[in-house]
Image (cartoon, helix red, strand yellow):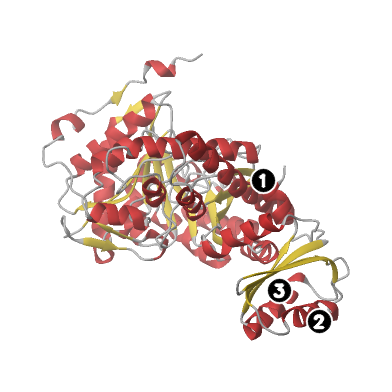
Amino acid sequence: MLFNTGEILETVKMIETENFDIRTITMGINLRDCSHPDIDILNKQIYNKITTQAKDLVKVANKIEGEFGVPIINKRISVTPISIVANACKEENYTSIAQTLDKAAKEVGVDFIGGFSALVHKGYTKGEKNLIQSIPEALAKTDRVCSSVNVASTKSGINMDAVLEMGQTIKKAADLTADKDGLGAAKLVVFCNVPEDNPFMAGAFHGTGEPEAVINIGVSGPGVVNNVVNKIPEANFNQLADTIKRTAFKITRMGELVGQRASEMLGIPFGIVDLSLAPTPAIGDSVANILEGMGLEYCGTHGTTAALALLNDAVKKGGSMASSSVGGLSGAFIPVSEDQGMIEATKVGALSLERLEAMTAVCSVGLDMIAVPGSTSAQTIAAIIADEMAIGMINKKTTAVRMIPAPNKDVGDEVKFGGLLGEAPIMKVSKFSSDKFVNRGGRIPAPIQALTN
Amino acid sequence: MVKETGQKRAVLTVLGSDKVGIVAKVTALLAKHNANILDISQTLLEDLFSMIMLIDIEDLSLDFETLNKELEELSKELEVQIKLQNEEVFRYMHRI
């Protein structure tokens, strides 16, 4: 045999029984050349550019899926932050641009389009002000558009005016989509140290340092890692880390292969592989289950942060050996509503917002897909964002908040978004006020960690 | 523009419960479309049948996708799982 039978069966088993897949092929497209003072002309140019550039994306992805026999779950597009593209527009309401993105996404058949975004970690331009004010309506009137706002960085500190405004924006986005449990807020993420090449939603956009167009790949495989961890219940931590590392290597290699092939077929440069373990609501495809497989009764109990630190680091190490172009977020995601194990852990009372916050200090992103009571104030949400931004700023890492204040729901209720976004029990937030703190205004200065030059 | 890229060899795996004619039917379909079998390995673990073939698809008389579809129909008929994948998948995943 020219191949090792064991290796072949291992690969087939990963795909068939452990939910291994390529989570997303994301095409980044520069839209800066679409700028125009007249928003109608701008919209037309954006639509034409996206539908031309990405017309073969889905076809190519399907072809690769067939050839390699590995499912490619999502095909997505990320674009230049619209706050930059629309900066010259006389019109202040950018909702029609979001609708254009939505229409273009539907035309080319991608499931999400990211880039209704702004970077305001130090301050606002006119375009950024307009964009943030347009977010709630834009997300309520579109299906596939995702929005992100970067409000902090290690180099510039935390823009607390923007943090407060995002607290209000999240509330509005949820309220305008009250009939869908506040779905608008599930498509909106607030960042510290946002990466410019992240292929995952809702935070994807095409950064200003990127080429004209680029192909980025997001791989996944919590189910595969879960399975290998469960096979070695007696292993010590060194063996555990080593096993995860080897598995992450194999998963990432597939991402690299798919990225190179897609890049070749589309004639667009290959950007990065993001080797994040991204859970889905499917049973077993859960990051929480991996942590539980390491010996925790439920994700969220004492030891969870240490377990996640080991997992996140081993994933990065294995992945960085497998590809010379690792980027994006790369690590483990801990979205509550998208992870069956996290949902279970929340229901039994093992997992709380405080524990999740601690976990974000050692994993690749932040507080993700967490539903909180609809009565939570904009100030409280802003304070939660501020905490999370502080963790990212000081630790020189990406952190994010994607939180849904579910209208008319309270602790004990659940929200259901369906599909990959899943469902979540409402989590308790502190009943004590942070209003005076977040209302101060201004910027929390950049930390000493910023002075690296 | 979608460019066609070279694909020469593929790995075909068949997994399922053993029954008469699996090998015959799979190889007949491959022969019909001019796919040359380079190597073959078959094992039986209790009742689970597993066959792995390395096939040359350089001179395939139809495209990869159509062959995949026909194999899918055959897999339903035989009630086994048949998977055809470009060999690069395995080379990439297990080797540097």
Q: Local crowd at mark 2 within 10 Å, few (<14), some, or many (≥20)? A: few
Circle 3: residue type: Asn
Task: Determine the residue positioned at 33% across, 40% down.
Answer: A304
Q: Position of residue B63 (x, y in %)?
A: 79, 72
Q: Secondary structure at mark 2?
A: helix
Q: Quadrant of residue A388?
A: top left
Quadrant of the image containing the N terminus of chain A: bottom right
Labels 2, 3: front one: 2
Q: Residue furthest left?
A: A432
Label 2: which residue? B28
Chain containing mark 1: A
Chain containing mark 3: B
Q: Local crowd at mark 3 within 10 Å, few (<14), some, or many (≥20)? A: some
Task: Determine the residue positioned at 51% across, 60% down.
Answer: A19
Label 1: which residue? A270
Instruction: Left or right? Give the position of A142 relative to A14.
Output: left
Circle 2: residue type: Ala
Q: Quadrant of residue A158?
A: top left
Label 3: which residue? B68
Front-most of residues A162 and B29:
B29
Chain containing mark 2: B
Q: How far apart are the two marked residues, 1 and 3, measured between alpha carbons?
A: 27 Å
Task: Determine the residue positioned at 17% across, 45% down.
Answer: A377
